[in-house]
Image (tube, grey):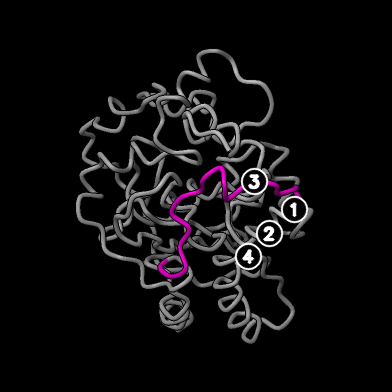
Amino acid sequence: MIVHSLNEAFAAAGAAAWGGLPFSELAEDMTAEAVQKAETLCPHPQTVLAAAFPYYAGETSGNLSLYARGLDYHTVVTGRLNTICNFLSEKYKNALFLPAADNSPLPERQAAWRCGVGLRGKNGLVIVPPYGSYVFLGTILTDAVLELPPHTPSPHCVGCGKCLSACPGSALGEGGVEVSRCLSELTQKKGELTGEENDLLKAHPLIWGCDTCQRVCPYNARPALSPLPEFREGLVDSLTGADLAGLTNRTFREKYGDRSFAWRGPAPLRRNLELQGEQG
C-alpha cells in the first residue's frame, strides 16, 4: 500500500521516476566520512529514496547551460521532495525525513542507479527516458524502514561513445569523469586559471556550465519538455557584461540569487565573458 501511495505522491510532486534502497546498500558507495556525515544528520539511517525531476525547456540560444536557466534546482527539488516528506511524516509519526538536492553527503547518482532510476550514461549522468539526461536528482534520507518497490541496478546506456569523443576538455573516459578537465567545473572555478584552462574557456560557447556531452547523446535527441513551471517559465538564457555591470556580491545575489549560477558570485561569470571577448 505504501508503495502505491508513494507512486502517487512522487508523481504529484513532479518526479519523472523514483526508487528506494536500504541506506546500508548505498553506504557501499560512500566514504567513511560521508557515512559519518549522513549518520550525524540522521542517526540510525535506514532508507534512502531517490527521484529525478525533468528540467528541459526546449532549445533557445544563450550562454548559460540549460540546467541553470530556470529557478535554482536546489530549492525547487528540495521543496518538491518536502511534499513527500510531509506525506510520509503523517504515516511515520516519529521518523525523520531529510530531503536534499546536490547538497548532502549522499551520492545521488549512485543512489539512483542502485535503485534502478534511469540508465547509466558514460558521461556519469542518469538518463530517464523520455526526458533524457535533462533531470535533476534529489534524495530523502530517513530512519524509517520503508516498504520499497523491487529494485535492480540501472542498466548502462547503449555505449555509443559520442559523449566521450565530443567532450571539449577530454574529461570523459571509460574510467569515469576527470572533474578537473570538465568545462562545467572550469566555468565555475574561482581564482587564477592555467593557460590551458583559459584556452578551453575562450573556445567554449557558455559562460556557465557545459551541455556538450548531453547534446550529442542519442537519448537526448528529442527530449520531452519538463512539466515543471519552475524550469519552464521566467528563464534567464544569457548574461552579458551589461547585466553584471556595477553589481556587488550582495546586489548580484539580490538580482540573481534564485538561480543556480549565482552561488559563486559574479566574478567567474565576468571572467568568462571577458575570455570570450566581451568587455563590460
Task: Sort mark 4 into few (<14), some (14-19) or many (20+) by Cα contacts within 10 Å.
Answer: many
Q: Kindly identify the amino acid type of the residue bearing the numbered disc 2.
A: Pro
Nearest to the eye among marks 2 and 4: give it.
Answer: 4
Residue pointed to by mark 3 = 245
| The disc label shown at residue 45, or none | 2
Residue pointed to by mark 4 = 99
* Picture coordinates of residue 49, whole percent (x, y): 53, 63
CA–CA distance in space, label 1 to label 4: 14 Å
* Picture coordinates of residue 119, whole percent (x, y): 32, 49
Nearest to the eye among marks 2 and 3: give it.
Answer: 3
Residue in the image at 38% along x and 57% along y:
117
CA–CA distance in space, label 1 to label 3: 44 Å
Residue 244 sits inside the magenta stretch? yes
Q: Quadrant of residue 254?
A: bottom right
Q: Quadrant of residue 34?
A: top right
For the N terminus, the image quarter is: bottom left
Q: Reading the chain from its start, which is encountered first: label 3 or label 4?
A: 4
Residue in the image at 54% along x and 65% along y:
77
CB under 8 Å between callouts 2 and 3? no
Image vertical order of residue 234 relative to residue 115, above or below: below
Determine the secondary structure under disc 1.
Answer: helix
Residues drawn in magenta: 232-250
CB under 8 Å between callouts 2 and 4? no
| The disc label shown at residue 39, or none | 1
| The disc label shown at residue 97, or none | none
